[in-house]
Amino acid sequence: MESWFGHPLAVNPEEYGLLTDLYQLTMSACYTGEAIHTKTASFELFTRKLPAGYGYLIAMGLEQALEYLESICFRPEHILHLQQTGIFSHATDSFWRLLENFLFEGDVWAVPEGTAIFANEPMLRVEAPLWQAQLVETYLLNTLNYQTLIGTKAARLRQAAGPDAKLYEFGTRRAFSPQGSLWAARAAIAGGLDATSNVLAALKLGHKPVGTMAHALVMAISALEGSEDESFAAFHRYFPGAPLLIDTYDTVAAAERLGEQVKAGMALQGVRIDSGNLVADSKAVRSHLPNTPIFASGDLDEYAIEQLRRENACIDGYGLGTKLVTGAPVNGVYKLVDIDSIPVMKESSGKLTYPGRKQIFRRYQDNQIVSDRLA
């Protein structure tokens, strides 16, 4: 049989069954050998503690989790590849038949995407035959952990920036993978951002992509056509609705020259500052462009935005990338809580779990969360 070695490392939904950790498969084979694989098991996905300084998480990733559960399968060639590893030489024939005929038979209980949750509260519960509930752990953690990270960071950025600021997701180049960039854009918009620069994500989500320009265009046209102003004029000629990037050479001088053009009738829709002293520079730019939106970018997070607002920076919107898509990890875990109607718990030091199936009962007062109860 042809080896997979050297094939592109891209995810194909037909390969979802193999997109897992080895021990999910070996444990499932063990359950099958012991003839307990059909026992109904309940696993809950939750985080033991919040990231440092966080007061909540925004649950995200459910749509992709459900798509995975509906699509997961094992093609004959996948089963053959597993057999050829030699790892499963003692697995029973019935295990291979289960993989060959895989169809997820469980139920999923979950909080709606966008819900605020807290430590030890289940984002999602899977109730399924033991071997299936075990097998899906890795992918569920991957999609919910990462998108919850992004959704939470986006909500914190919105909280810091206020309701009126324009917030754009610019993190595709810093996301952990091309697939991750799509999930990041989705979760960021759900968490409170206005739009994304990721063209594929925007179009698939039914949004219009947003963007400005890069220093490369300013430098290229300046070198070939004579000046920074030529680069502004050229880009504005083709994309009159896009903000101009003004910090390539001298931010304030560029704003001053653009201010004269605006007085002469130029319809400038915005400028972006990507470096320097954002407080001082934004105030100077505002003095020359009093009615033009000013956008800021450059490794900004919620703490930087709060500081800019405290210092009365003249900023109307933010481009958010690195610290959005690579934020504080959400260390979600997926733990067995019930098997064949027997509540179970983990007693390890520092990793104690609560036994039994649980859900969140939330109490509100004046549209504010007052308390949660697990029961």
Image: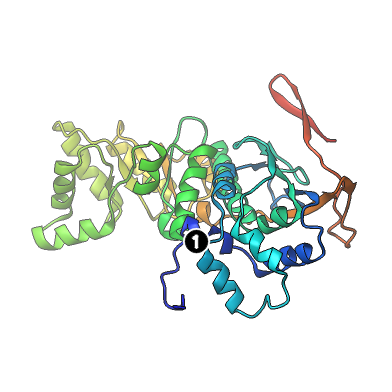
Q: Where is residue 308 in the image (x, y as percent from the top left)?
A: 50, 44
Pointer 1: residues within 10 angstroms few (<14), some, or many (20+)?
A: some
Specify whether residue 38 is in view.
yes
In the depicted view, which residue is nearer to us: 227 or 176? 176
- Residue 213: give x, y in percent of width and height: 27, 51
Q: Where on the picture, by quarter, is residue 141?
A: bottom right
**Left or right of residue 366: residue 344:** right
In the drawing, does residue 234 fall left or right of residue 374?
A: left
128 and 364: which one is in front?
A: 128
**By what rule are the colours in the image chosen?**
rainbow
The amino acid on which the numbered mark 1 sits, given as a three-letter code, is: Phe
SS under mark 1: loop
Q: Residue furthest left?
A: 225
Position of residue 180 measured from the top left corner of the image (x, y, whole percent): 49, 55
Location of residue 140 with respect to 156 vertically, above or below: below
Q: Residue at x 27, y 58 (%)?
A: 215
Quadrant of residue 255 in the image?
A: top left
Q: Please tell me which residue is depicted at 39% across the width and 55% down the height of the picture.
A: 276
Q: Say if 232 sits above or below 368 in the image.
A: below
Outermost residue on the bottom side: it is 86
Along the viewing direction, whichever of 56 and 235 lies nearer the viewer: 56
Q: Please give the count of numbered marks on the rendered protein.
A: 1
- In the picture as drawn, the residue positioned furthest to the top comes out as 366
- Front residue of this view, candidates 258 and 121: 121
Looking at the image, residue 120 sits to the left or right of residue 331; the answer is right
Q: Name the residue under label 1.
A: 176
Q: Can residue 24 be seen in this view?
A: no
**Position of the C terminus by quadrant:** top right
The residue that appears at 59% across and 48% down in the rendered structure is 69
Image point (21%, 57%), residue name: 217
